[in-house]
Amino acid sequence: MFINRFLGFLPKSNLKKALSFLNKGEYKRSCREFEAYLAHKAGVIGGKDQEMIRMYMVESFIEYARELENAEKYDESAAELEKAVELQPHYADVHFTLGRMYGYSDKTVNARESIKRALAINPDYFRARIMLAKSYRDDKKHDRCAEEIERAMSAAPNFFIEQVRELSREIRIEPDGKRADDLFERLLEERPSSSQVSKQIALEAVQNGDYEYAITELKKSVSMNPNYPDMHNLLGIAYANMGMTDDAVMEFEIALKVNPEYLKARINMALTLYEKGSSEAAMTHLKVILNLDPENELANNLLKELEPVLNKR
């Protein structure tokens, strides 16, 4: 299987264990191994290949935080999200979710600061704007609440505009009333997009080895988000695990066209080409990776296996 070959090029370490657990959906164990890896690296994970590793780490912490949230362990969930924020401070969604966890634990100041950070990254983050408005209402700062609701109006999806207008009226007339409570709850209700649903289903399918189902869901997601390189990369992985190497190569190519420095997709491309028997093409991608980051362990391990093959020709 493609994923087994990928793991085979990792050095035997906490990192290899962490990625293996992540692939199986064992997020708690994945997080603990990533933390051991970080401790070994003294918290320093610089370089282009480490950027890819950071992405995996953040994904692991976020997924484990989601499990803890579902178990209503909000303080523990917040602790995992704090680790994700430290690794990648530019994800508005992570700050927003962290703000929600703080809110559940009645850490009002921390919650508001996290929501503000989400909005600093994405000023049009509708649900974050509504949550900030609610935090001001909870503190009886009704003027500030009204200001945030007005700002939310410009970011509101069309099907929410009338509800936002109604909320604005309620805050002016009866700010602490039941109707305002209901409107805030409705506007803050979790509504994952169709593409998010498809991506999550696909991730679970990949982890369960159901690559055919993953491909079906990822095609839906890609049709809605054609310029998201991570979607194409994941679709390429699913194709590769099905032995559909030409399709896999095409998806990795699309991902790299969107982001030529997307090392996760490029190493997957090199590995797929190598598995396909296109060693020279694989070497071309390895050279790009090693030019960006000469210390990339994955690329160097694959290079050691490729060089003897090419030297025989």
Image: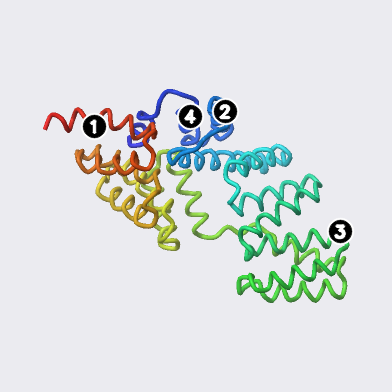
Check the image and report above or below for 162 versus 126.
below
Name the amino acid, label 1: Leu
* Amino acid at the residue labelled 3: Asp
Q: Quadrant of the N terminus?
A: top left
Q: Crowding at label 3, few (<14), some or many (≥20) Cα neighbours within 10 Å?
A: few
Q: Quadrant of residue 192?
A: bottom right
Q: Which residue is mark 1?
A: 306
Residue at the location (54% across, 25% down)?
40
- Residue 264, position as x, y percentages in the image: 40, 43
Label 4: which residue?
15
For disc 2, the marked residue is: 42
Compute the Cα span from label 2 to label 4: 14 Å
Q: Nearer the viewer, mark 2 or mark 1?
A: 2
Rounded to the nearest angstrom, the CA distance separating label 1 from label 4 is 23 Å
Sequence-wise first label, 3 or 2: 2
In this figure, which residue is indicated by the disc labeled 3? 139
Q: In whole angstroms, how far apart are the C-alphas of marks 4 and 3?
A: 45 Å
Name which residue type carries label 2: Ala
Q: Are marks 1 and 3 in contact (CB under 8 Å)?
A: no
Q: Which of 309 and 225 lies nearest the eye of the viewer?
A: 309
